[in-house]
Image (cartoon, rainbow, N blue to C red):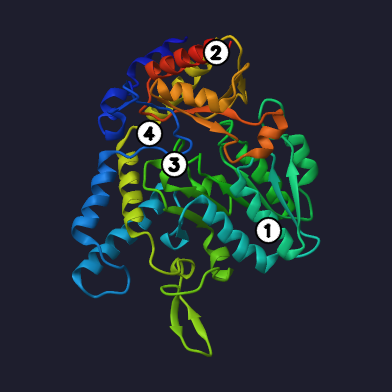
Amino acid sequence: MSAARQDAAVSRPAFDVEAVRQDFPVLHQEVHDRPLAYLDNAASAQHPVQVIEAVAEYYRRDHANVHRGVHQLSQRATAAFEGAREKVQRFINAASEREIIFTRGTTEAINLVAQSWGRANLGPGDEIVITHLEHHANIVPWQMLCEQTGARLRVIPMTASGEIDLEAAREIIGSATRLLAFGHVSNALGTINPVEELVGLARAAGALVLLDGAQGVPHMRVDVQALGCDFYAFSGHKMFAPTGIGVLWGREELLRAMPPWQGGGDMILAVSFEQTTYNALPWKFEAGTPHIAGGVGLGAAIDYLERLDFDAAAAWEHELLVYGTEVLGAIEGLKIIGTAPRKAAVISFVLDGVHPHDIGTIVDHAGVAIRTGHHCAMPVMEYYGLPATARASFAFYNTKAEIDRLAAALRQAREVFA
């Protein structure tokens, strides 16, 4: 290592994982008489006390419906909810809060684009392109849209290492492509996809780009303008906020041209039996009473992440990935599925002679929470000829000692089924 790099390494502050863990009450409990090791963060991350208290304080003091009331509680609730929208805008560097649409999560955000933009713009002869790595939420809505419009769905294949086949992408993305939709990070394998290259291919073809950012926002800095995409979808519960709240970001000119996809209160300016005048952005896409507490919690989660040393947290997650890959990879009979050189802190694996569901049960009794199954990515499992995998996914509050406990539990599982 050069002297300059040594100096940089010395000057870089260490990430204090034990201090951060104090912010997460759920981590300080026992499961089956063992300390909990929560390694299921790709499914849903835990909440810091700051988020829990923000939501509780809203319910204790400020709960009322938003936008419609002149009384003080409604005004406070509206200010908190719309304040969260402004925080999201700054967090992902959107050009305006008008580009921030609150949804129930990534799934609803993708369905919104499919049913609003897609139904208005696609027809026979048009193509939607996705990849073999996608989560079901970025497959099924496009299949439904193709059935509705006569458009065609095309799939970019994957490689054995769990990466998108860029050579095939260059062949598939072409003059008929109207939309390219793919995940920023694979939920099943952790692969960080080549956004710049794929966006460039779509732009050359004149196509729009939707990024599923559910696994991206919790692990890396996201700048939607720098990414060059047209839509970006993500969920609050992956990034330490409540469930039931998420975001669709879209370029304002596209959102303005898109019709509403749900009708009702709050997405209107005027209603008569003859005609309805729709509301302005972003409320045109937010029919009915929103998840106000969820928005408050999302804003609090962003506040928490912005106070955190995000770069140090990301570096710690990568260190956990490297350590976990080494420790788990040393277990006899264990095979890691997905070996892309660029990965988020996700390790999917199988163990010879042990079904993933049995793995999950045994490690649970050791106090270790992991995910087992197809991870809502059945085409990925089919590619590898597997019914399921076990998946350990790390957040910045996890430790190497927890990975050691997982490894010990896996060795026990192997002995039980030997």
Q: How crowded is mark 1: few (under 14 residues within 10 Å), some or many (20 or more)?
A: some
Residue flagged by tag 4: what amino acid is it? Phe
The residue at which mark 2 appears reads as 414
Q: Residue 13's image quarter?
A: top left
Q: Which of 359 and 254 is in front in this view?
A: 359
Residue flagged by tag 3: what amino acid is it? Lys
Left or right position of 138 against 262: right
- Residue 212 location in percent, x, y? 56, 46
Instruction: Determine whether 283 is above or below 179 in the image.
Output: below
As measured in the structure, the alpha-carbon distance from the residue carrying label 4 to the one carrying label 1 is 38 Å
The residue at which mark 4 appears reads as 310
Residue flagged by tag 1: what amino acid is it? Met
Q: Which of 85 and 34 is in front in this view?
A: 34
- The earlier-in-sequence mark between 4 and 2 is 4
The residue at which mark 3 appears reads as 238
Name the mark nearer the viewer: 1 or 3: 1
- The earlier-in-sequence mark between 1 and 3 is 1
Work out which quarter of the rendered image holds the C terminus and state it. Answer: top right
Q: Nearer the viewer, residue 15 or 38?
A: 38
Name the mark nearer the viewer: 4 or 1: 1
- Residue 164 location in percent, x, y? 69, 35
Look at 53% across and 58% down and name the residue there: 250
Does the residue at mark 2 contact the one at mark 3 (Cβ under 8 Å)? no
Residue flagged by tag 2: what amino acid is it? Arg
As measured in the structure, the alpha-carbon distance from the residue carrying label 1 to the one carrying label 3 is 26 Å
